[in-house]
Image (cartoon, coloured by chain):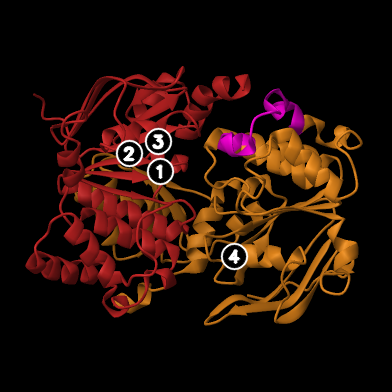
Amino acid sequence: MTAAAVEARDLTRRFGNFTAVDAISLSVARGEVFGFLGANGAGKTTAIRMLTGLLAPTSGEASVAGFDVYTETESIKCSIGYMSQKFSLYEDLTVRENVRLYGGIYGLSDAEIRERTQALLARLGLERSADDLVRGLPLGWKQKLAFAVALNHKPGVVFLDEPTGGVDPITRRQFWEMIYEAAAGGTTVFITTHYMDEAEYCDRVSIMVAGKIAAMGTPDELKDEFAARSMDDVFFQLARPEESAR
Amino acid sequence: MNPEAPTPDAAVVVDRVSKRFDETLALDQLSFSVDYGEIFGLLGPDGAGKSTLFHILTTLRVADEGNARVLGLDVVHDLWDLRSRIGYMPGRFSLYPDLSIAENLAFFASVFGTTVAEQAELIAPIYNQIEPFSSRRAGALSGGMKQKLALCCALVHRPDILFLDEPTTGVDAVSRREFWDLLDDLRARGLTIVVSTPYMDEAHRCDRVALLQNGRILDLDAPDRIGSRYPLPIFAISRGSRYRLLLVLREYPHNHSVYPFGDELHYTDSRAGADPTDIANQIREYLTGKGFDGPEVRPITAGIEDSFMELMGAPVGEGESS
């Protein structure tokens, strides 16, 4: 058994005769910020669905927070946090109600929920908006709140699927500071993004191309390997052959 | 911020346009103009007012106050003349998911009383890229292909001006780059293009950009010129743990702002007019004193994203926490 927070070996998922995820292997350490990059349709979402216990793999092995993705999916769901750009909070519930709802879903006691809600709102500076509907919050605030909610049950691993799309540049950076803080506290962060400057903020990144992990390493290692000035260039070199073949 | 005096014979003239939705002032006395043949970028985050502005310019919504003209036509009074001359790609994918690529295109052509065959030459460079999949349902396409199909549909009636609302949002970095190459080609063929994006790094693909935040224009100019107006000395700083570097720089007495930027930090110093080389030396000394080994501190020219952050100041809600 390994101490890695996320571990996959030859993880594969086929839909009919289409191989969406093709024998990917990776190992993400506790407290690491891991960028999971790839072009649209490269297989990122399918891989994340397997790692979060929502979709059974066709073959290969994987564990998340020490739990097996075939047999312990319920334990995985309790041990992780998840947020995405598309779905994070209930718009017609208030800020406080969302925090309470998710606390309850993740099995926190009423006392824990009360105590953590106060701390969470104070940390975000949202006390005055606690009883406002989430719908009325600016997108950047929603996303910061969603992240805090995803961490409220103190999961070992948090999956962030394009959390910063459309967010203004200052809030985007505040969001990344929250990520650094969480990672410094031992939470493993598994994140996808289309902002290539954000790829540079990760400890390590992998780049998926057509279902396979085509490259993996620290941003500096990848830039060296591809003789590229930026992660944008690395990404372009890798994704381009597949894109032009379409 | 002075509203730019609109040029009367420009491709787009927006004159003190305001639009309110309940409590929210989506557009606040907006004025600007777009020249014929340019790619004009509207840069701003979600909620800046970009889509509302597109709705008004494409005759789908009426402003509360102010006037707007597109191709010399009034967006309210001349809407029927205008509609056939503009191409519009809405922010949400709005083609028919159950129709194939070819069927969607034929449908949009027929709505404007033309055929795909008649317009083949204009759309060919884009359509060729998706033609191999022409029988595939639009709903089953990848992000980059959906975007190309939507652009074909917006072009199929040969408009004089294109309005593209966040065509690259949620699209990967490679497809985004290719999409901008297509826009370059269209501009070369004489089209005027107004395009919005939340990606600041796309600003350099535009001739001019307006930085939009909370329904107001923060600045408007060629991308390089906006950066050159940055009011304070700015530096790129790297070496060592980025997060620790950030926290330490934030405590520096002359810190105005410090933000992560790719593999560096961008640090802005509050000493306007001071010699950047002197400041750089002092920061190096400060960082060395804090245990950083040989920090790299380099004066730089501000980019669009630096300018945007400086101009927008604290985001909404920030003031409430203190």
In the rendered image, what is the letter of the chain coloured orange? B
Helix, strand or loop for disc 4: strand
Taking depth in this image into account, of A131 and B45 the one nearest to the observer is A131
Of the numbered discs in the image, which one, if any, rests on residue B212?
Answer: 4
Amino acid at pointer 1 = Glu
On the image, numbered disc 1 is attached to which residue? Answer: A198
- The answer to the question of whether label 2 and label 1 lie on touching residues, with beta carbons closer than 8 A, is yes
In the rendered image, what is the letter of the chain coloured red? A
Instruction: Give the image quarter of residue A72.
Output: top left
Amino acid at pointer 4 = Leu
Same-chain status of marks 1 and 3: yes
Residue B136 lies in the magenta stretch: yes
Q: Mark 2, residues whose alpha carbon is within 10 Å: few (<14), some, or many (≥20)?
A: many
Helix, strand or loop for disc 3: helix
On the image, numbered disc 3 is attached to which residue? Answer: A45
| CA separation in Å, label 4 and label 3 | 32 Å
| CA separation in Å, label 1 and label 4 | 22 Å
Pinpoint residue A33: horizontal percent, then vertical percent: 27, 40
